[in-house]
Each structure stands twice: as C-alpha cells, then as structure tokens.
Image (spheres, grey):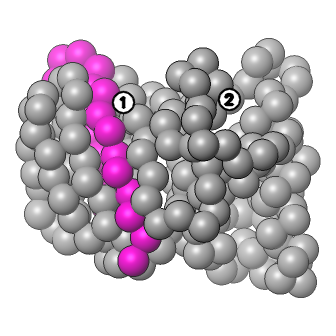
Amino acid sequence: MRETDDAPSLVDARLAARLAELRAERGWSLGDLAERSGVSRSTLSRAERAETSPTAAQLNRLCAVYGRTMSRLLGEVEAEPALLVRAAEQLRWEDRSAGFVRRAVSPPHAGLRGELVEGRLAAGADLAYDRPPVPGLEQHVWVLEGALLVTAQDVEHHLGTGDCLRMRVWGPTRFRCAGPGDVRYVLAVVLP
C-alpha cells in the first residue's frame, strides 16, 4: 500500500526489509529466490528496496518459499507483539491491481497457530494462488457481506452472506468476488 506515489508506506518499507532479511538468513541470491518462488529477480529486487509492493500472488509465493502464512510475514513487520490491537492500528495491506484489501485482525504473534484476517475483494476481483503458503494450512472463510466464489482442490464453492467454508489447503486456491458489489469476509487461518 502506498501513501503517495513516490514514497513507500511504513508497511512497505518494513516488508521490504523483512523480505531481504529472510533471503539473507538463508544465504540465497536473488536468482536462487527467483528460481524457488517463480517471481522474477527484478521484481524481487525492487520489492526488497521498497520500490514496489509485491502483489498478493507474489507475496503468497514468497510465503510458500519461507514457510510462513501471509499474516505471519506481515505480522513480523510490526514493531512489538501485542495482546490487543485496536481497529485503527490493525495492519492493512492492499493489492490495488487485484482489487484486494487485507487487514490483519489478530494481534501478531509468531508463536501462535491461529489468526484472523479480514479480506475485501472489489466487484469482479479474482485472486488465484498457485500454492498454499504452508501445505495443509486450515482455513475457515466466513462471508460477512456479499458473495464469494472459492475454489480449492478443483471444487468451486459459492458462499453468500453468513456462509462459512472450512478447508485444508494443499494446492492452488482461487477467491473471486461473485456479486455485483464488493465482498467482505473473515479468514481464520490455522497452521497445521
């Protein structure tokens, strides 16, 4: 998410530093990471310098390589773990090109297995992930407003307001806004 077109937001700057740190911890070159993740070297380089914010799909690929959920990675860019995070202080990340806004509802904590995330997809938005960030990840998708199509294990599920889908994620998934308006949902994520 950019606060202006020229300067990275605080979240983008911290995310860039954490991505560079994770790669350095493993002793990988940009080429090594590009090969493992399927994200181009130039995109990785620009993301690590906070010149661009990775898309949701790119961030998912990096999470898969690093064995983290997106919430955990984004939680790691927070300063201090807290027991309570007020709504105004919850980390919000946006993939404008995909029409996706993600808000980390749960207070970040690397040692816990569960977390809550609020997702918003604009009308017509379509997010496809080619792999789970952690194989066997358990997800509960609860639609608060609108209609959502979720595809997992080649099965498409149509969810309306109030519906909840539980799934274990082993392969590609897809989240599509099915209604004429936006969809807002809660994603409960539980590590295996």
The quarter holding residue 8 reads top right
Give x and y (percent) for residue 40.
Answer: 71, 63
What residue is at 54 percent from the left and 47 percent from the top?
56
Does residue 172 appear to the left or right of 96 in the view shown? left
Give x and y (percent) for residue 21.
Answer: 87, 65
Q: Within 10 Å of the Cα at label 1, are there few (<14), some (14-19), or many (20+) other Cα atoms? A: many
- For residue 65, which numbered disc appears in the image? none
Name, please, the residue furthest toward the front.
83
Q: Within 10 Å of the Cα at label 2, are there few (<14), some (14-19), or many (20+) other Cα atoms? A: some
Q: CA distance from mark 2 to mark 1?
A: 15 Å
Task: State the residue in front, 187 or 158.
Answer: 187
For residue 73, above or below residue 142: below
Is residue 108 on the magenta stretch? no
What residue is at 67 percent from the left and 43 percent from the top?
82
Quadrant location of the C terminus?
A: bottom left
Q: Which residue is mark 2?
A: 1
Task: State the residue in front, 106 or 20.
Answer: 106
Does residue 171 appear to the left or right of 135 in the view shown? left
Q: Which residue is mark 1?
A: 121
Does the image show residue 192? Answer: yes
Mark closest to the chain's N terminus, 2 or 1:
2
Span highlighted in magenta in the image: 171-192
For residue 90, above or below residue 107: above
The quarter holding residue 138 reads bottom left
Give x and y (percent) for residue 33.
Answer: 75, 75
What residue is at 16 percent from the left and 52 percent from the top?
165
For residue 113, above or below residue 2: below
Residue kind at label 2, given as amino acid type: Met
Task: State the residue in front, 182 or 97.
Answer: 182
Is residue 191 on the magenta stretch? yes
What residue is at 30 percent from the left and 59 percent from the top?
139
